[in-house]
Image (spheres, rainbow, N blue to C red):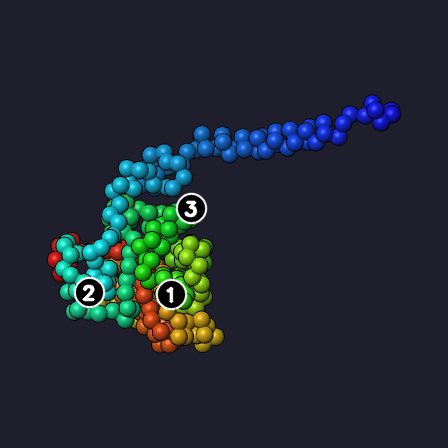
Amino acid sequence: MDAEASPPRSIFRHLRGALGACRAAFAHIPRLALDIALPTLCVSCREPVDGEGVCAACWAKLSFIAPPFCPRLGIPFVYDPGPELLSMEAIANPPAYQRARAAVRYDDVARTLVHSLKYQDRTDLAPTMGRWMARAGQELLAGADVLVPVPLHWRRGWSRRYNQSGALARVISRQTGVKLASEALRRVRPTEQQVGLSRSQRASNVQGAFKVAPERSAEVAGRRVVLIDDVLTSGATTDACARALLRARAAQVDVLVFARVVDTHRAPI
């Protein structure tokens, strides 16, 4: 066949492009069918939701923490008492860490989010929860040198397969550019679950449970550390972690969590 009878090369290019588009379209069919058959459900109310894991109605029920709050503990105030006035809890029982901030109150919806991330392999929730934490902790993160997640003991980490605090810390690190030191802090002995323990029992349970290994001390020495966790209840775990980091010569330790328990039965100031 002579050159004049040969099909133009542009036709072959268009055919290849059309075939590629068809292959891409067919590749999405199984995913589309799965989405139709098994739509993503809100982790709280189980209604279908698009993407974020929380429907608009449940998102509206989340109680985001905003000023005014205690500058030390981040506990929300009923009214603004004036600049730098501490809560009674911060005055009576000051923690080892410098400041704590949380994205939301630990209510029913927040509890469902935390438990889904922690116990039900819903790691897809970490990006949303981490973004909310980054926004709530802007003041802490602006001056931070390193993020350190609260560690699991290796036995619990083996059974869960991932650390929810580490998943949140990775999101915040990507969001803010603050360096992540995921192995700096270790839980050197297993501890009981804190749920159901009194404040004093919680403190005893985690006493001496955390340590910065000598080979990791350079990651925190002289650094402003932000400790990352999912929930702050009595503060016993974060306080024990902060003491371990300060023993390793961290310059300052702040705490950033997704949710914190707020005692509504006691006046915050």
- The residue at the point 44 percent across, 71 percent down is 219
Q: How far apart are labels 3 and 2 at the CA level?
A: 37 Å
Q: Dot 2: few (<14), some (14–19), or many (≥20) neighbours within 10 Å?
A: few
Mark 3 vs mark 2: in front: 2
Which circle marks residue 124 in the picture? 3
Report the residue marked by disc 1: 144
The tag earlier along the polypeptide, 3 or 2, is 2
Q: Nearer the viewer, residue 167 or 253?
A: 253
The tag earlier along the polypeptide, 2 or 1, is 2
Secondary element at image label 1? loop
Q: Amino acid at mark 2?
A: Glu
Question: Could one spot residue 231 in this view of the protein?
Answer: no
Q: Quadrant of the C terminus?
A: bottom left
- The residue at the point 40 percent across, 50 percent down is 126
Report the residue marked by disc 2: 84
Q: Dot 1: few (<14), some (14–19), or many (≥20) neighbours within 10 Å?
A: some
